Amino acid sequence: MSRFVDRVVIHVAAGDGGNGVASVHREKFKPLGGPDGGNGGKGGDVVLIVDSQVHTLLDFHFRPHAAAGNGKGGAGGNRDGANGADLELRVPDGTVVLTPDGEVVADLVGEGTRLIAAQGGRGGLGNAALASKARKAPGFALLGEPGEKHDLVLELKSVADVGLLGFPSAGKSSLISVLSAAKPKIADYPFTTLVPNLGVITAGETVFTMADVPGLIPGASEGKGLGLDFLRHIERCAVLVHVVDCATYEANRDPLSDIDALEAELAKYTPSLADDLAERPRVVVLNKIDIPEARDLADMVKPDIEARGLPVFEVSTASREGLRELTFALGRIVEEYRASRPKQEATRIVLRPTAVDDSGFTVVEDPQTPGGFIVRGERPERWIRQTDFSNDEAVGYLADRLARLGVEDVLVKMGAVPGAQVTIGDLVFDWEPSTPAGIAAVAMTGRGTDARLEPHNRVGAAERLAAKKARRLPGAYDEDLEEEE
C-alpha cells in the first residue's frame, strides 16, 4: 500500500572541496623547474528540483540523508582535481523548505524550479596559483573548503485551484471522483479519506485542479480528527468549497452550523493566514439531494446561505444532478482569480557592491575572556579554514594575509597586547604582533618554513597557534588571490 507523506526532515551535506597540492616541476637537467601544484576540485552541490511527476515526500521519509560528491585533490604537473558530482533531489510542486526553527528558506513552485540546499566547498589552490614575487616556489597549498551541511524541513502544500472542505462523510471524495479521473477511497464510514486527494477537471477551455482533505470536526485546531495535519494543502487554493451533507442524521447539525464550525477552525488553524483565506472566494455545495429529505433541507437553507453572499449549488454525486453547473461555475471563479493575480516577473539579479569603507571584517572584545578579542568576517574566517597549520610557511602566509587586511592594526588600536587571546572562526590563539601591517617582505627560508616561526623568534606562538586547528565550516571563496608585495 502506498503512503502519502507531506512533511519530512532531511539532512543534506554538500561535497568538500579537494585540497591543493604543493609540487615542484622536475625533469632532467632542470631539477627546480618551478611550482606546478594543481588546484583541488569543487565539492558537489545538493540541489532541490521541482518535478511534476513527484507527488509525495515519501522517498525522503525512508532516506532522509543526502550527500553530494567530494572534489578531488590537485596533482603535480598543473593538474587540477575533478569536481564532485552534484546531487539532485526531486520534490513535488508546492514544496516549502524551512529551517528546523520554522524560518522559510524557499517556496518551490513551478516545474523545474531549483534551490541549492547545500553549497559545495571550493577547492584549495595549489602552490602554482600561490606563487608570487615574494614566494616564487611556495612549499604549501591551501586546503579545500568543507561543503555546507544543513538540516531542512520539507512541507508539501498542494498546488490546487479548488479546495474542498467538509465534515467527515460529507461526500468530498465522491465529488472529486465524479468530476475528475481521481479514484479516492470511498466508504460509508467517517474518516475514510486519510490523505489529500487531487483531481484534474475540465470545464470548457478551463482546466483546473481540485483537492480535498480529510474531514474536519469541531476542535480540529486542538488536534481532534485528521484534517488539521492536512489543511496546509488548501492554503494555495483559488476558491474554497464547503461540501455540506444535507442527509446527516445528527440532531445537533445543520448546513449553516457546519459552515460556521469549519470557518472557525480555519481561523484558529492559520491565524497568520486568516485574513488572506477570508478573502478567497467561497462556494457552498449542498450534497446528497437525491435523498428527498436532503433536497427539502437544501431548499430550506439555500436562501439563508445566499443571504451571506455565498453561491450555492445543490448537487448529487449519485445521480450527477447539478454537477455541470457547479463545474463551469468553479471554472469561471478560477479564471477570474488567475486574471487578478499579478503576472510573475522574470527573475532579477540584484547586485550589492561592497561599500568603499568596508574593511571586510570586524573586531570586538570577547565577553567571555578579559583582554581577549574576536575577529569576524567572511575573508579571515575562510582563510583560517584554508590553512594547513602543520606547515610553518602556510601559517606565515596566513599571518601576512591577516596583516595586509588590517587585522593587526585594528587589534593594536583596540588595546591588544602580546599574548592576548584572539578568536577567528573556531581558531583560538595567543596573539604575537610579529607581522605588523606594512612590514617589508620577509626573507624566505626553506620550503615549508618561515623564519618568523623559528623557535628563537616565535617564543611559543606557533605552538599555541596550532594547538587548536580550525573546525572545517562552509564559507565563500576569494576568487581574487592577493599577491604579497
Image (spheres, rainbow, N blue to C red):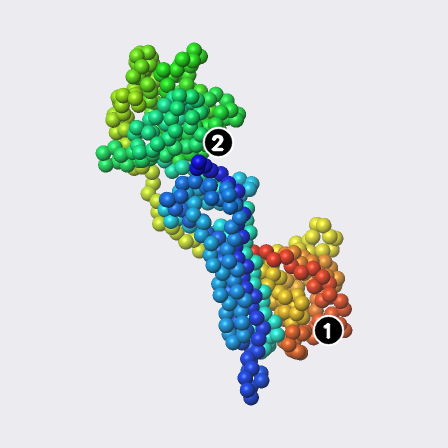
Q: Quadrant of the C terminus?
A: bottom right
| Residue receiving disc 2 | 229
Q: Is residue 356 visible?
A: no
Name the kind of residue labelled 2 in the image: Asp
Q: Residue at x 30, y 21 (%)?
A: 318
Name the kind of residue labelled 1 in the image: Glu
Give the structural element (helix, strand or loop) at label 1. loop
On the image, the x and y values in percent for residue 105 come to 49, 45
Q: Nearer the viewer, mark 1 or mark 2?
A: 2
Give the crowd class for mark 1: few <14, some 14-19, many >=20 residues within 10 Å: some
- Residue 257: image quadrant is top left
- Residue 286: image quadrant is top left
The correct choice, above or below, for 87 with respect to 54 in the image is below
| Residue receiving disc 1 | 454
Considering only order in the chain, which callout, 2 or 1, is on the residue closer to the N terminus?
A: 2
Residue 114 vs residue 434, the one in the foreground: 114
The correct choice, above or below, for 369 with respect to 287 in the image is below
